[in-house]
């Protein structure tokens, strides 16, 4: 069974039209297509995710928040809705609300790929470096450890969690990506690089300004014309990208 947490840009997201339009800043055109797709299948998690990511990419954060919040209230809710709703709240300057979404995401009915909610635990670890009075580093790492211990060691989510916790070296995580499709490999390595620098921030090996400057270069690289659209789509399928973009924008 493929590790969906590692390959979460589903096939229909690779249909180029809306994403090419959004990349060219034709937000109205791109979002119109995504809205039409969503209206055809309003109960489908994939369509909801794609439209929400489109809102985030277009920097329509209030719309993204309202959209993903709908998903969090479903009886069979999915962790990824909580992850993206929190990312929208983080950008809107509401870290307490973001952290509440991520805490709630740990109890979601469904998690992408491995059936264990760990994505929001990873986001809480990052949040603890910025808002330690809202979530401490010890608590965030404990929650991630609890989730990681329930994941098969060979799965991407488990490897990434163990790396963030300092249990394994970065080379072990990146080795997992070697046999993946090129665009998947590049997106996963982007996530690993994000957590590498976030881990340094959490352990006071780099300050907040240094963290933001580093991830600014990562965001710019992801969004550059030299990054093909499929790779970009896979990166956008990680809520970490939008957290990084928010922090990078705070550079004075």
Image (cartoon, helix red, strand yellow):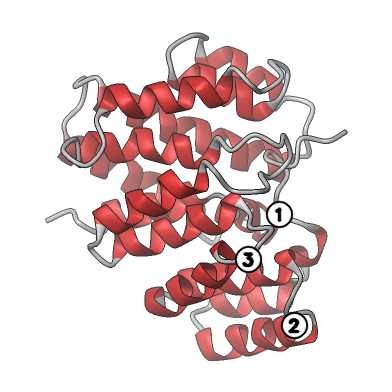
Disc 2 crowd, CA 10 A, few/some/many (<14, 14-19, 20+): some
Residue assigned mark 2:
37
Task: Answer with mark 2 or mark 3, whichever residue precedes in sequence.
Answer: 2
Quadrant where the image shows the C terminus: bottom left
Label 3–label 1 contact, CB within 8 A:
no
Circle number at residue 225? none
Residue assigned mark 3:
74
Residue assigned mark 1:
9
Q: Is residue 221 above or below residue 22?
A: above
Q: Is residue 159 above or below residue 207?
A: above
Q: Using the rendered image of the protein, determine whether residue 23 is visible from the camera's viewpoint.
A: no
Q: Is residue 228 above or below residue 137?
A: below
Q: Position of residue 32 (x, y in %)?
A: 63, 90
Q: Using the rendered image of the protein, determine whether residue 72 is visible from the camera's viewpoint.
A: yes
Q: Is residue 13 above or below residue 96?
A: below
Disc 3 crowd, CA 10 A, few/some/many (<14, 14-19, 20+): few
The residue lying at 73 percent from left, 44 percent from top is 7
The residue lying at 60 percent from left, 90 percent from top is 29
Q: Position of residue 8 (x, y in %)?
A: 70, 49
Check disc 2 and report its element: helix, strand or loop. helix
Between the residue at mark 2 and the residue at mark 1, the CA separation in whole angstroms equals 16 Å
Q: Position of residue 146 (x, y in %)?
A: 51, 22
| Residue 17 left/right relative to 163 | right
Label 2–label 3 contact, CB within 8 A:
no
Q: Which residue is more in the foreground, 123 or 99? A: 99
Label 2–label 1 contact, CB within 8 A:
no
């Amino acid at each position: 069974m493929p590790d969906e947490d590692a390959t979460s840009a589903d096939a229909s997201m690779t249909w180029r039209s809306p994403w090419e339009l959004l990349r060219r800043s034709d937000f109205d055109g791109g979002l119109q297509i995504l809205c039409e797709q969503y209206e055809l299948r309003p109960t489908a998690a994939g369509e909801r995710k794609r439209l929400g990511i489109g809102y985030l990419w277009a920097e329509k954060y209030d719309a993204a928040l309202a959209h993903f919040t709908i998903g969090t209230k479903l009886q069979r809710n999915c962790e990824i809705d909580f992850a993206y709703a929190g990312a929208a709240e983080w950008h809107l300057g509401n870290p307490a609300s973001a952290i509440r979404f991520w805490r709630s995401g740990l109890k979601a009915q469904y998690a992408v790929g491995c059936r264990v909610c760990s994505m929001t635990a990873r986001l809480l670890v990052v949040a603890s470096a910025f808002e330690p009075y809202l979530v401490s580093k010890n608590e965030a790492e404990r929650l991630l450890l609890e989730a990681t211990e329930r994941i098969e060691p060979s799965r991407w989510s488990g490897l990434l969690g163990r790396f963030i916790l300092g249990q394994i070296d970065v080379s072990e995580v990146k080795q997992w990506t070697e046999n993946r499709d090129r665009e998947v490999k590049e997106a996963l390595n982007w996530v690993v690089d994000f957590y590498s620098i976030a881990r340094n921030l959490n352990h006071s090996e780099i300050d907040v300004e240094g963290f933001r400057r580093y991830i600014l270069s990562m965001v710019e690289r992801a969004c550059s014309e030299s990054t093909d659209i499929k790779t970009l789509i896979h990166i956008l399928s990680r809520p970490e990208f939008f957290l990084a973009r928010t922090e990078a924008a705070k550079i004075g």
